[in-house]
Image (tube, rainbow, N blue to C red):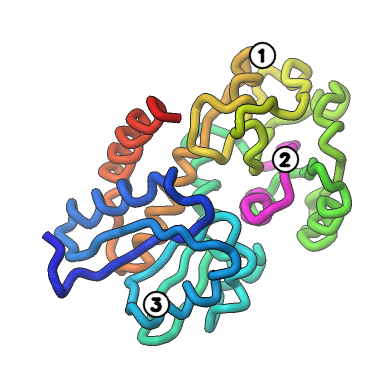
Amino acid sequence: MITGRTRIAAVIGDPIAHSLSPVMHNAAFAALGIDAAYVAFHVLPADLRQAVAGMRALALLGCNVTVPHKERIVRLLDSVSTTARRTGAVNTVVRSGNLLHGDNTDVVGLRRALDEAGVALAGADVVLIGAGGAARAALVALGDAGVRRITIANRTTSRARRLAREFATPGVDLVAAELAALADPARLAGCDLVVNSTSLGLGGGPFAPVAWSATPRHCHFYEMIPRPDTPFLAGAAAARRRRSDGLGMLLHQGAAAFALWTGVEPPVEVMRSALAAARRRALRSW
């Protein structure tokens, strides 16, 4: 029951109606008997500064941040974690008194999801598609895991080159490439992991051409979007390659955020079950 003592946590983004996060976090609050509720707020880019001021004024417990605000919100907060500073993006805001602290739990979320999927990262050759906020978290997660090589493929090659320079890591060969390079069999012949951090194909259009079948049989295709039916994953399925979608990343970044807000261990399996059920319902309307 929501009362005058109920604390509110939220997620902000544009768009936001599709978000599965409220189901996951409300299930966790209920399981632990925490008097809190989680809601989704549609915040336009032009209104981000006012939304951050609202987090202070309304004494929110905390907030998640999704596209397109992850990078812009950094400069509006009082402090950010080392991880958020390294990525240049924030997906979790923690309120302490009247101060707002930014963190990035996408990094640990991706690592835990890939671990669950059985992807060996040490020494791996990785192709990362995209150069936005999600890609920045992936670069930190993959670099810290000891991958050997990351090819950043992006529609705007200059942006991929900037990321390659910014995230230069000792022992990791960072290469920028145009999106068309994904169709080159030679480029993917030794690839161990392909990560899609974009929303390509979700609007009903096709995904960029990819030489799925040129990859080794063990190559894993990871889709950051928590949908099992994306064109990216469909191509991997047709090539009979290992694959997984972003539900695991959503779960584990959410669990990490929950721990930051509440200071208690999150009920991960409760959150996982709630997410899976919510996605089954959502798939019928997607």
Pick whichever of labels 2 and 3 is earlier in the sequence.
Answer: 3
Pointer 2 and pointer 1: residues touching (CB < 8 Å)? no
User: Disc 1 residue type?
Assistant: Ala
Q: Tell me the residue at 32%/47% (across/down).
A: 24
Q: Position of residue 266 (x, y in %)?
A: 30, 55
From where the camera sits, is residue 220 visible?
Answer: no
Which corner quadrant holds the N terminus? Answer: bottom left
Asked whether, in this view, residue 15 is left or right of residue 198, the answer is left
3 vs 1, front mark: 3
Residue 17 point in image, percent of width and height: 42, 47
- The residue shown at (57%, 55%) is 67
Q: Which mark is residue 239?
A: 1
Q: Give amino acid for label 2.
A: Ile
Magenta-colored stretch includes residue 136:
yes
Q: Residues within 10 Å of mark 1 (few under 14, many from 20)?
A: some
Magenta span covers which residues?
A: 122-142
Q: Is residue 237 visible?
A: yes
Where does label 2 land, which residue? 129
- Location of residue 19 with respect to 218 vertically, above or below: below
For marks 2 and 1, the one nearer the N-term is 2
Task: Give the Cα separation between the discs numbered 2 and 3.
Answer: 33 Å
Secondary-structure class at tag 2: strand
Q: Identify the residue at horizontal 82%, vertical 49% (top origin).
A: 174
Q: Secondary structure at mark 3?
A: strand
Please give the residue where the numbered disc 3 appears in the rendered image: 95
